[in-house]
Amino acid sequence: MKRTAAFLGMAILPLGLLTGCGASEAPAAPPADPPKGVSVSLAQWRSDEPVHAIEVAVTNTTDTPVYFSDVQLVTPSFKTLPPERADALLKRTPRTDLRIPYGAANCSPKGLPTLQPATVVAHLRSGSEALRRVVFKVPHPDPLLTRLLRDECSAFLIKEAADIEFGDDWTQVGKVMRGSLVLTRSGTGVVAVQDVGGTTHYIATPVKKSRPLATLDAGAQQARVALELTPGRCDPHAFAEGKKAFLFPVRATIDGGEERVVIVVPPKPLQERLTAYALKTCGLGG
């Protein structure tokens, strides 16, 4: 009897091991509610725009310090990026910003999408508690995300039909930089540039005074917008704070539809030439 029991025990053991190896891992713990008195909102500074970032503005109305290990924006309207390390211990604060990148907008060639609800997911520790995953619901519809989605998908619709770039014909004539924006066919539709705006540093003046400034007809492969650039500000502080100096807004339409805005940025070599030109024209050297 003892030998039989031992044999049965040995036969059962591998089966138990096989069952253990094939078993799925325990499900992750559900996200916890935010700590009492801790809330978040979304904001964006001027310096965030060129690098596709936003601020998670944290408010802590309690005397309990809260440690944020990482932060992440999650919404179907934008591609989800991995959590951004924060490593921030926040005591009582009316607002402390944690900067995070956000993913590209999920756009459609069929038109502008509707903003979907968003959450801010963070791994945090309140006081001496263990680190836990917390989900903050962002009030819907969030005005910042609404604008970011609209702007990015508006540009997407234009780019589906044509690429808009700075040409290679920029030269200085007197105290003016003259050149062109080039529209190059990338899809279908009649693309018309209605206006070109300036930036914090440069005044953009189209040579043609009537609208549209240029039209890329359905059968055309390329069109140009003749443009003049002059310095918008000449104080040294302006050149020191040039976060949006080269983000030129171009208003365009497809097949006579609603105006959409595309941000067009000159390539780095042209940016350097424009900076040297502006410094010299402003009498600041360079």
Image (cartoon, helix red, strand yellow):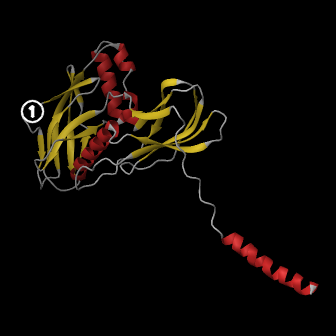
Q: Is residue 220 visible?
A: yes
Residue 44 relative to residue 154: left or right = right
Instruction: Classify mark 1: residues with Cα within 10 Å, few (<14), some (14-19) or many (20+).
Output: few
| Residue lying at 17% horizontally and 32% vertically, measured from the top left | 227
| Residue lying at 22% horizontally and 22% vertically, measured from the top left | 230
Residue 90 relative to residue 149: left or right = right
Residue for badge 1: 208
> Residue 229: x percent and y percent?
22, 26
59 or 211, nearer to the observer = 59
> Residue 170: x percent and y percent?
24, 32
| Residue lying at 9% horizontally and 33% vertically, measured from the top left | 208
238 or 207, nearer to the observer = 238
278 or 79, nearer to the observer = 79
The single residue placed furthest to the left in the displayed view is 210
Which quadrant holds the N terminus?
Answer: bottom right
Which quadrant holds the C terminus?
Answer: top left
Residue 117 relative to residue 6: left or right = left
